[in-house]
Structures are given as C-alpha cells and as structure tokens.
Image: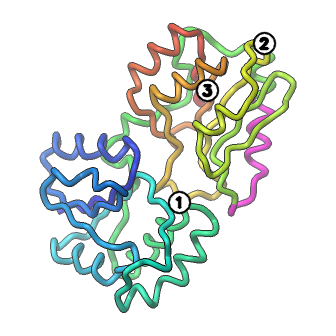
Amino acid sequence: MLGLIFGETQFPKEILKKIKKLKINFFIIDLSTNRIFKKEKNVNYVSLGQFGKIIEIIKSYRCKRIIFAGKVKKPNFSSLKLDLKGVYYIPKIIKAAKKGDAAILKEIIQILSKEKIKVLKSNYYNPELTLKKGIYTKIKPTKENLNSIKHGVKILNKQNSFDHIQGLIIDKNNKFYKEGRGGTKKLIYSIKKHKDLENILIKFPKKKQDLRIDLPTIGIDTLKDCKKIFIKGIILKSNANIFIDKKKSINFANKNKIFIKVI
C-alpha cells in the first residue's frame, strides 16, 4: 500500500493518474484547502497538527512508503487542532514555517522517518515529468542569452540554504528579479513588459533542497505567462524539475519562439 500526502497544484493529479495506471493500491491524506481529492477512494482528512493521527492512519494501512506532492499552505497555527504528538512537534513546525512552505513538509518528513516510514521522491513513479540536459525547442539561446543565463545561475547558487528562492528572471543587461513567496506567476508579472530586454526565466531547486518535495514546476500556464511578458526562454536543472503538459508546452514554446533549455 502506497501513501499519498497531497497538497495543491496539478502535480499530485499527475501522480495519481500514473498510480492508477500502474494499478498500485493507495490511500490519500488530503492536505489541500478545498479537499480536491474528495471523490477518490481511501481519502483521509486531518489537521496538520494531528501528527499522532497522521501516523495512525499510515500504519492502519500497513504502509511503509509515502509520497509528498503539492504545496501545503502555512496554516493558522493558533487554530490548529492538536493531538499529543502535535503538541510535541508543533514548535518545530512553527520554526520551520519561517523558512517557507516547503520547510513544513521537510519537517514532517523528519517526523515520519522517526516512525520508520520512508518518503519517496515525488517523481518516483513519474520520471517522464523531469527533463535531462538539452534544448527542447527549435529556437536556441543566443550567445548573449547564454551569458545572461551563466550570470543568473551564479546568482541563484549564491543564495543560502534557508532562502526560499527557486527562480529568477534576468535580462540582457543582467538586471535580475528574484522569486519570492508569491511564486513564479507573481515573479513573471512583476517585471517590465519589454520585448527587447530578452528576459530569461531560470527555475532551479533551492540550495540544499530536499529533492523529495517541492521540485520546481512549470507547465503550459507558465509558458502562457511568459508569452504575455515577452520572456525569451526558460532554463531548468537536469532531473530536478517537474514539467506538466510537456508536449503541449513545448509545442506552445516553438510556436511563440520561446526556448527551453535544461542544464
């Protein structure tokens, strides 16, 4: 039996689709705000502060393997329902939340490991959603673009291990804009809409990120946003990304002269 602890975004739905195709028995702990998996079988709802109950649910299915996927929004800690283990662990969760939403899941992983429950990489059953090194579009980056990319990657690599930055946009003048807690969409619409600036979006995992959770994710919606703001290209890191609607997105990129490069 496989345990699926799901939050928001499209990625959990892609995992579920694959799990069903492989005919793997599963149960879900739904941490999404609107209970988006309510129509599925073996769905469980629990407060994030009820760690005793979470562990009890997992063990009731005789489960030894878990996959986390999707974003879990930082809860209102003062209104959380807590059980005894929740009271014990919640100070660590609150401390982790100050580092970003992904840090909450990372802390939960550490709690589960103490219970000898293994957490698999989120793309364990969906390796096709990640990309290897290469250029995936007809259009290729220019020499000027490559210089901007090199500079942008250096900036990302300098971020400390507690930074929540997963990406940035850099233009041909090496002016850059870092992603904040609002995510990629907010970053894209925060920059100046100017075709000649040749802005490039770089999406990498955080430094020292636990690659079992919160991998940088893009899809057709990201490409559509990029088109509106005249973003010239997208840079991803090899085997450390999630690409939703890959074929559709690459076709859209080709049509709109946006390059996709994985390094």
Q: Where is residue 75 in the image (x, y as percent from the top left)?
A: 48, 68
Say whether marks 1 and 2 touch (CB < 8 Å): no
Circle 2 Cα neighbour tier, 10 Å, few/some/many (<14 / 14–19 / ≥20): few
Residue in view at x 66 percent, y 17 percent: 230
Q: Is residue 3 magenta?
A: no
Q: Where is residue 25 in the image (x, y as percent from the top left)?
A: 14, 56
Q: How far apart are marks 1 and 2 (CA)?
A: 35 Å
Give the residue furthest to the front.
Answer: 79
- Where disc 1 sits, the SS reads helix
Residue 196 is marked as: 2
Q: Mark 3 points at which residue?
A: 234
Which quadrant holds the C terminus?
Answer: top right
Task: Please name which of the two marks, 1 or 2, marks the residue nearer to the observer.
Answer: 2
Q: Where is residue 231 in the image (x, y as percent from the top left)?
A: 66, 21
Residue in view at x 85 percent, y 29 percent: 174
Going by the numbered disc 1, the residue's amino acid type is: Ala
The front one of 208 and 79 is: 79
